[in-house]
Amino acid sequence: MFSIPNAVDDVSPSLRILIVEDHEDLADALRANLRSEGYQATVASDGRQALAMVRADPPDLMVLDLGIPGLDGLALLSRLRAEGHWCPVLILSARDSDSDKVEGFRLGADDYVTKPFRTLELMARVDAMGRRVVRERAAASIQQAAPVAAAPVPDASPFTALQITGACGLTLRQAEIALLIAEGRSNPEIAGQLGISRFTVRNHAEQILARLKVESRWQVARALGEAVAMVAAGRGGAPGAPPV
């Protein structure tokens, strides 16, 4: 069961994360960890470089150190928000005073983690932020797509994996994974719930995107809803899906 406005983190292409960190070893480690979880991660080593990168191609998420050269992290955050860039920002800093944390949140940070940090906790916080991003995008996409449909997309709560297989041409396992993607589950969560490996989840997720003809995981919820709505209206399902 799933609710149409929900979705999950990207895999192919994944959510894009900008790491703003001037310590090369730490930046490389963060990038490697994020990429291992399916994210696209790039690094900016100073505030001015980060500002230019966001202006040219806004990321989906940002991990921001405060003590960076060129433009201090708080100054960068303030500038970005003033310019209308509202990607979620997780501050990762050795500054652990209450005043620094309060100032970070006041300027628009979404989370604050102090150094030294536990990698698993940081990844969990990034995952949580990523799920919020894709859920918001899924909801916006569904609203935009609704006028195109001949009838409103039905409430997805009654959908089952079996219905999804018929509407979208997915295997039963792929349908189970697609429903969990649409609920906002991360790869580790899906793997744990279904008792399969993350590698298997990732491979199936890529096949699901290809079958649904969407480019990112936050579009899966909309694609499933539209396919089932088309079947209900007698117009077929997803491209390549067998007749039902």
Image (tube, helix red, strand yellow):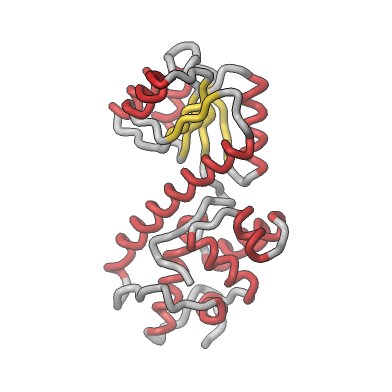
Residue nearest the observer in this picture, 112 or 62:
112
Residue nearest the observer in this picture, 145 or 104:
104
Which residue is painted at 66% across and 59% down in the image? 192
Left/right of residue 154 with respect to residue 183 in the rendered view: left
Q: Residue furthest top?
A: 70
Residue nearest the observer in this picture, 210 or 221:
221
Residue 57 visible somewhere in the drawing: no
Q: Position of residue 189 (x, y in %)?
A: 60, 56
Q: Position of residue 22 (x, y in %)?
A: 57, 17
Q: Position of residue 220 (x, y in %)?
A: 49, 62
Please tell me in which quadrant of the rendered image residue 123 appears. Answer: top right
Which residue is painted at 63% across and 45% down in the image? 37
Number of marks present in the image shown: 0
Left/right of residue 218 with respect to residue 103 in the rendered view: right
Residue 207 visible somewhere in the drawing: yes
Which residue is painted at 33% across and 26% down in the image? 107
231 is higher (above) or lower (below) than 42: below
210 is higher (above) or lower (below) than 46: below
Q: Position of residue 115 (x, y in %)?
A: 57, 23
Left/right of residue 137 with respect to residue 40 in the rendered view: left
